[in-house]
Image (cartoon, rainbow, N blue to C red):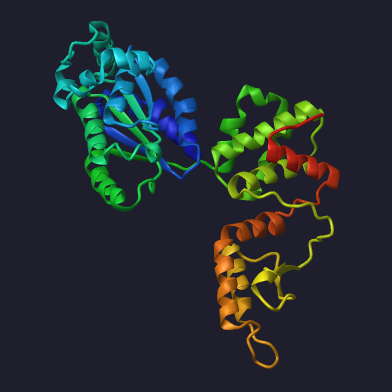
Amino acid sequence: MPNTETLKHYLLKKENAYLLDNNNNGKTIMLSGAWGSGKTHFWQNEIEPKLKEKLDNKACVYVSLYGKESLNDIKSDVYLSANGKNLLSTEVSTFGMEALSAIKDSDLAVGKFVKAGKSLIDSKKIQKGIAKLKKGGIICFDDFERKSKNVDLNDLFGFISQLAINLECKVVIILNSDVFKGKEADIFKQLKEKTISKFFYFNPSPKELFDSISDNSKYDALDKYKVDILSVIKETEELNARIYTQALDNCLEWLEVKEFIDLYIIRVLVLGTFNFILNHLLLEYNNDLKRNDYKVIYFPTSLTQNKSLFTLIKYKEPDEEVFFDKLKNILFDVNEKEEANLLDNEQQENLNWLYKNESKLKALWKYGYILYYTADINKEEYDQVANYIKTGILLP
């Protein structure tokens, strides 16, 4: 069974499904996976709507940590959202930051709040929100990598743990395993061991991710093209929900404006979109390149006295690292007189240039040589597609 279907079955559909079983109240759950693999899309489109249908008068809250500057911001978002209220600045100012600060972990167990002289109405909104979370509500925290540095990781996980335990609700954390770096990574490892009760790994195939996104009714006009679009996406070997969406949007707009889209246009649109978003590169049109075994790679002539320095690199290297190693190795090649082609200082200058441009060189290798799509259509069409990808504007 595909990964996403297995997760949906386990979380929602099977007997005593995990997120619907009250025996799991008080637990904190982690849904992890690669960056861009569509975890948020999966939760918001495949899990959350079904939960809201099945939960009996209990809240299902989604909280993004993006832009949250303090733990009080996060608390207010949780409680007001649980009561069906958005986090509005007027509500926060009316209730007062002092009142939010007064919501202690111990208060969660008994539902007591210090009003700090602020509006009784807003205090009741908070209390109603907590009542909807108690004994079966669900809170999902996302965008950990975008939390403010002002939010202490220890305090955040302490709050999350107390939410689950004291309110007897379920807490879901969505994040990448490598989201934290340096000191925070060590803290996270310790907190994870203490806090997380259950781990779920989100690992969809490209087809699963594509199907979940393209199933949106807005893409119905692309139904007869979706097989070709997916086929091209698979060539990239990338798993990224945001870029899949952008590629679909570009294909859809092209079809709406031009009233026609063939396989060659699809290939240039999709691969060009991926290359531009991932690598900030647009390939220049070149129909002189043929699918030969070798391609000349020129070094920056400004860095060497030898203005004709070049090498032959095979198209079909096993991977980008082998390709890049070959670029480095040619700097140390010797000629027939067993003399290095470059002096030591020139070698170092060129190596510095290589490392500085490593990601772009690898992108050129992948999208320019391996996937090779610049000559699939004529120059006029290619330039129009490239300009559309770059500017976002498509004219009839």
What is the x, y in percent for residue 71? 27, 30
Q: Is residue 81 left or right of residue 278?
A: left
What is the x, y in percent for residue 276? 64, 46
Seen in the picture, residue 49 relative to 341 is either above or below; the reply is above
The structure residue drawn at horizontal position 40% and vertical position 26%, both measured from the top left corner, is: 12
**Front-most of residues 286 and 67:** 67
Tell me which corner region of the image, top left, top right, bottom left or bottom right, holds residue 72: top left
Q: Is residue 310 left or right of residue 5?
A: right
The structure residue drawn at horizontal position 82% and vertical position 29%, both measured from the top left corner, is: 396
Report the label total.
0
Q: Residue furthest bottom?
A: 337
Q: Residue furthest top?
A: 121
**Front-most of residues 357 and 25:** 357
Tell me which corner region of the image, top left, top right, bottom left or bottom right, holds residue 215: top right
**Front-most of residues 40 and 381:** 381
What is the x, y in percent for residue 174? 39, 36
Q: Is residue 314 left or right of residue 344?
A: right
Q: Is residue 83 visible?
A: no
The structure residue drawn at horizontal position 77% and vertical position 51%, both measured from the top left corner, is: 374
Seen in the picture, residue 256 relative to 326 is either above or below; the reply is above
Q: Is residue 315 visible?
A: yes
What is the x, y in percent for residue 146? 40, 38
